[in-house]
Amino acid sequence: MKNELIKQAHIAKEKAIPKYSNFHVGAALLTSDDKIYHGANIESSSYGLTICAERTALFQALLDGNREFKAIAVVSDSDDFCPPCGACRQLLSDYCSPEMEVILSNKSETKVLTLKELLPFSFNEEYLK
Ligand code: THU
């Protein structure tokens, strides 16, 4: 499944619209019932409004009613990994299990981390009570 998710993230990357950075990112999010949602980054001329691949995948899946997720794969064209930015780590933590696998893949290697490893001691709904 890991390889399939990485493959889907590469397909998703083709949909990216990185008009300003030309940095293409693709994500593939696996739901608990084995559906795969694509995400890709979409940039704005007001740079801060740019949205990352991870969040577009998450939002599409949430809007379709999905609430449980098994894994997300993230890829770019860089030789290095493309670890999720802080905003994406927070959003993923808000909607996915701390044990969810985040699969990072570059041209030669794959690294698998849990969400909890990427964002320890995170702010969450417990602090709103
Ligand atoms: N980007 C992502 O889509 N995901 C990441 O994990 C890191 C960064 C995007 C945002 C922006 O369009 C471009 O990469 C450069 O920061």
Image: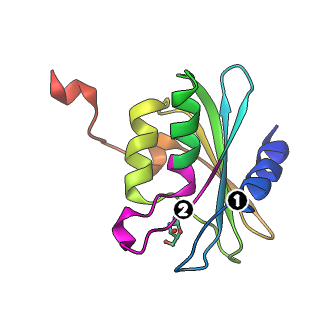
Residue at the spot 41% in from the left edge and 75% down from the top edge: 45
Q: SS of the residue at dot 2? A: loop
Q: Give the vertical position of 74 relative to 45 (above or below).
A: above
Q: Which residues are magenta?
A: 39-55
Residue 117 in view of the camera: yes
Q: Which residue is mark 1?
A: 15
* Residue 31: quadrant of the picture: top right
Crowdedness near tag 1: few (<14), some (14–19) or many (≥20) residues, C-alpha within 10 Å:
some
Identify which amino acid the numbered label 2 is placed on.
Ile
Count of number-bearing discs: 2
Name the amino acid, label 1.
Lys
* Residue 92 inside the magenta-drawn segment: no
Residue 54 image position (x, y, % from top left)? 55, 50
Viewer-closest of 73 and 24? 24
Q: Is residue 119 visible?
A: no
Q: Nearer the viewer, residue 120 or 94?
A: 94
Horizontal side, residue 56 vs residue 47: left or right:
right
Give whichever of 33, 43 is nearer the camera. 43
Q: How far is mark 2 from mark 1, CA to CA?
A: 9 Å
| Residue 60 screen position, x and y as percent | 57, 37
Q: Nearer the N terminus, badge 2 or badge 1?
A: 1
Query: Residue 125 falls in which quadrant of the image?
Result: top left
Please, is residue 112 above or below residue 125 in the view? below
